[in-house]
Image (cartoon, rainbow, N blue to C red):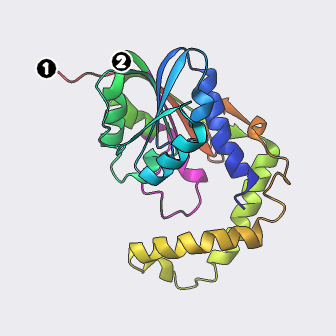
Amino acid sequence: MTPDSLLALHDAGYVAVVERLGPGRVLDVGCGEGFESQKLAGGGRVVVGADYAPHALGLAHHRLDGAVRFVAADATALALGTGTFDWACSSHLIEHFLDPTAHVSELARVLRPQGTAFVLTPNAPADFENPFHLRLFDPDQLAAVLRSHFHEVWVGGLEGSDRVKADFAQRRARAARLLRLDVFGLRHRLPRSWYVAAYSRALPMAYRLLARGDSGGDSGITAQDFHVAEHVDDSTPVLFAVARRPVRPEP
């Protein structure tokens, strides 16, 4: 029941990464069940997916049957050698850390001296309430975090077509109407673990009630409705960063 626009947005991010990859070793951090990791393969590349959830990795390994290698690891403490990858991808992961420094540091550590990291994350002004998003960034904030660990940083956006913008606006409006039922803002007064648990249970039901016609391919929105843009404004849904040449700590 996930809306087509959200699935297409994630898919488009990996398309943008693949377009910028050359041969070598690629690390996909936060790979989950590897649906997107497999798209990084080919072109003389060896792909390794890393995720914190062993169960998801087991499903990924079974489904892909060796096309991608997988390792269970924390994205802030990767169980991988220093300077062993040419490319690293962190898609919709950095926003899940209150302090993203350790994650960015690990991306830099596992890359070779001329290596490149790709980071995708929601654009703070365009994001809608999500208790799993602990730290949101605007372009300058994301660039600042990455520049502390990379010599070259570029931050642009993953921009949507007019129908993507319309889809996001409609879903945001529907969600806002639902949230107005919480007149006293009780969800923000609950212990965070309770709020997260309630959100996790309510979201699938909300999609079933509100996303009819928006999912299952009915909307017609695909990855082709997104493109990488130099200019980012408050309506740009996702930031797309390219960080090159990791900074090595002084011995």
| Circle nearer the viewer, 1 or 2 | 2
- Dots 1 and 2: beta carbons under 8 Å? no
Residue 34 placement (x, y as % from top left) = 56, 41
Residue at 51%, 31% (x, y): give it: 241
Q: Quadrant of residue 238?
A: top right
Q: Residues within 10 Å of mark 1 (few under 14, many from 20)?
A: few
**Residue identified by numbered label 2:** 112
Residue 148, image x, y percentages: 32, 31
Instruction: State which region is magenta.
Output: 116-141
Q: Residue at x 47, y 51 (%)?
A: 136
Residue 25, compared with residue 194, is above or below; it is above
Position of 202 with respect to 134 (left or right) is right
Q: Is residue 241 left or right of residue 78?
A: right
Disc 1 from disc 2: Cα separation: 16 Å
Residue at which label 1 appears: 251
Q: Is residue 136 magenta?
A: yes
Amino acid type, label 2: Arg
